[in-house]
Image (cartoon, rainbow, N blue to C red):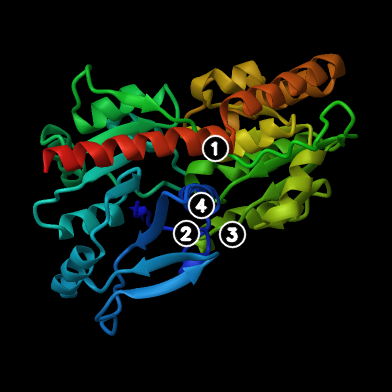
Amino acid sequence: MSKFKVALLVDEYFGGTGTVYGGYGFLARYLIAKHLPNENIEVEVLIKKDCSKQRLIPRRYMIDGIKVYRLAAKFMDFINIRFLKKKNYDIFLSIEMTTHSYRILKTIPNIDKKILFWVQDPRPDYEWDEINTVKLFPEKSYWDSNINQFVHDLWAAGKVSFISQARFLDRKARDLYNLDNKTELKYLPNPIEIDHSFDVEAHPKKNHIIFLGRIESVKRGWLFCEIAKLMPEYEFFMLGQSFRQSKKNQSIMNDYLNIPNLHFVGHVEGDRKNQLIKDAKILVNTSIHEALPISFLEALSYGTLLVSCRDPDELTSQFGVFTGTVLGDGFDKVDLFVDGIRHLMENEQLRQELAVKAVDYIKANHSIEDFQKNMQEIIFKLVEETKLQG
């Protein structure tokens, strides 16, 4: 039997082909493209069309043994159509519906293959209302009614199936894409690579507190810095860097460079990142908005607890301290984070008990093996449906 060919649609590939480092790209490169291919499934990655006028044909890159294509410029769509027709993918897997995924799918006239839409971070208007309360450094809105209508039309035509990385996102997806309440969004949690050799009860954790993610408006990294100022007895490590509007981000961070217990580590990957997470007791998340970030799952897999103003699927309140919603720039609510950190750091028995439960939870719900099995079953079913309908 020939392999099923999966086209993975994403706008960033965690540094691959010069793209930025973010959660979608990490999921695409280090989890899906790395672990989904097998003797039955072949994965190729399609990223955004090249805006260069010199890009007259799609360009292929080989990254970690996976074929990654950057499509030709928009004005060469007839070339992209020919390319996609020749490729004849069995199914399209879209991580959310970004502008670039939308443009790729819009290229295809009369789509006759199933689209598997992995709900990651749907943002209906009421989510943007909260995000827009930030005034220090406003987040640029990417609300697009054309994209939302496109997803609705695909759903109405029976061409798209939904999977969702977190249960609390289902309502938001239904609202954003105007889906009826009977629409199935099959629960498929994001996988992570679990270090089964790690013993959370034996590992000597340090009085370290980390921030993990891109430093940008929606993350409100300045609050992490404000917390560090108020807690000199602990060491704070900011893991991540700015990409979009980096000059504006850096101008804000410059005010915090001289805090002795605050360390700007920058972008880290692999063993170094894992070691920093292992050693920390708490991951602090100060975002005005989150879905269910992979950083939460990575932290919990090493028994690193959460203090956050976001509580996706109640993970923060189960394995840490949920401060409650914090809107605006957040300066007036810094004490909520400080109190949450002190509660965990000064109750060692509680912290250790929650750390063990966190590791067990991740092993039970976010393993690579479960992802491989469940995703393969979903793909096989959808491809067979397409063949029957065709």
Kindly state the secondary structure of the residue where label 1 is placed.
Answer: loop
Q: Which residue is at a point 28% across and 85% down the rendered structure image?
A: 54
- Quarter of the C terminus within the rendering: top left
Question: Crowding near pointer 1: few (<14 within 10 Å), some, many (20+)?
Answer: many
What residue is shown with label 1?
191
Question: Which of marks 3 and 2 precedes in the sequence?
Answer: 2
Question: Which of marks 1 and 4 precedes in the sequence?
Answer: 4
Residue 135 falls left or right of residue 53:
right
Question: Crowding near pointer 3: few (<14 within 10 Å), some, many (20+)?
Answer: some
Labelled disc at residue 250: 3
Residue 224 in the image: state x and y as whole percent: 66, 40
Write down the quadrant of residue 264 in the picture.
bottom right
- The amino acid at mark 4 is Gly
Residue 24 in the image: state x and y as whole percent: 46, 48
Labelled disc at residue 27: none
**Marks 2 and 3, Cα distance to the nearest angstrom?**
23 Å
What residue is shown with label 4?
22
Labelled disc at residue 13: 2
Residue 168 in the image: state x and y as whole percent: 41, 22
Mark 4 in CB contact with mark 1 (< 8 angstroms): no
**Marks 1 and 2, Cα distance to the nearest angstrom?**
17 Å
Tell which tag, 3 or 1, sits nearer the viewer: 1
